[in-house]
Every structure is written in C-alpha cells, then in structure tokens.
Image (cartoon, rainbow, N blue to C red):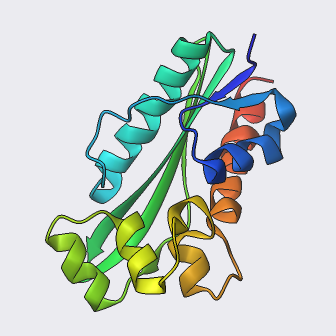
Amino acid sequence: MVQVAVGSTNPVKVNAVIACFGEDAEGISVASGVRDQPWGDEETIVGAKQRAKAAMKQAQAKIGIGLEGGVQLIDERLYVCNWGALVDEDGVKIVAGGARFPLPEEIKEKMVQGEELGPVISAFAKRSEVNKKEGAIGIFTNSAITRTDMYKQIVELLLGQYHFYTR
C-alpha cells in the first residue's frame, strides 16, 4: 500500500514530496477539478485540495498531497501563486501556500488571452517542458530557486503543520 499519494505525476511535484516523505510517496494521475490554468488563490487552493483527496482515495493511501500552481492579478500585475494541501485517512486537512513573484507583461498578455503558464514560459525561455523542470520561478530567479524547491517548501509547511496538529 502507498503511504503518501501525490495528486500528480509531474516529476517536480513528486520529487518535492519524496524529498520530505521519502520513497513511500508515489505520484498518481488525478484531475484537479479546476481549470488547467487556475486563476486566483481560491481556485488554486481548491485544485490542491481536490488533488490531495483524489490521490489518497485512488491509491488507498494514508496521506494525500495535492500541489497546484496558479496565477493571480494583484494591482494590475500578474503573479504566480502556488498552494498545497494534505489530507489523511483520519480526516485531517491542512493547506499551505508558497512563493509569489510577478511575471513580465508579455506573459500576462498571453495568460489573459487564455493560454496556460507552462507552455507560455517554455516558449518565452525557448526551453521544452519548463513546468516539469525548473519552472517559471527557475527562469525568473536564474535558477536560484527551482519549481521543485518551491513545492518542497510548501510540502515542508504541510508536514510541519501535520506533525503539530496530530501529535
């Protein structure tokens, strides 16, 4: 039986969870139940929660982790936002958020037209599958922080809260 089910097979998300939980974590392909490109904190949080629940249920795991990336307009600037959720078989539900950083205006324009961040960033950076590698945060921090690093911090927040509330 899988101990920790991650609601994605994206290596960035799975590796972030493995870094915190060890090899007991496994990526499970599940739907987020939100748009492919979530807009705003609320929709992004819903996607993370739904991924966590669906992964736990599908894998019959003790813990489900959902990680979801979105975008949010703040004062006419478009920011990346990231959220995570942890659920367990006893009904525990924990949420944590991660780094935010602004995107260039040319990316905002494409996003407002309905495009998804992953392909837009890949085209912008002239690299394939950026969302499965360094992510937008890796591009705009010159790899000082990668997408895996960012999600790992969210998973650490989830795990720390989990230990606090279930001790």
Q: Is residue 123 above or below residue 27?
A: below
> Where residue 6 sits: x, y (%)?
61, 33
The residue lying at 76 percent from left, 34 percent from top is 164
Most distant residue in the right direction: 22
In the image, 61 versus 10, the foreground residue is 10
Q: How many marks?
A: 0
Q: Is residue 108 above or below residue 146?
A: below
> Where residue 156 sits: x, y (%)?
73, 49
Residue 75 in sight: no
The residue lying at 30 percent from left, 49 percent from top is 36
In the image, 2 versus 81, the foreground residue is 2
Q: Quadrant of residue 47?
A: top left
Most distant residue in the left direction: 113
Q: Quadrant of residue 60?
A: top right
Q: Taking 136 as reference, is 164 left or right?
A: right
Q: Is residue 37 above or below residue 146?
A: above
Q: Quadrant of residue 132?
A: bottom right
Question: In the rendered view of the protein, which quadrant contains the C terminus?
Answer: top right
In the image, 12 versus 17, the foreground residue is 12
Question: In the rendered view of the protein, which quadrant contains the N terminus?
Answer: top right
Q: Taking 152 as reference, is 35 left or right?
A: left
> Where residue 40 sits: x, y (%)?
29, 58
The residue lying at 81 percent from left, 47 percent from top is 19
Q: Is residue 85 above or below residue 141?
A: above
The residue lying at 86 percent from left, 37 percent from top is 22
Residue 35 in sight: yes
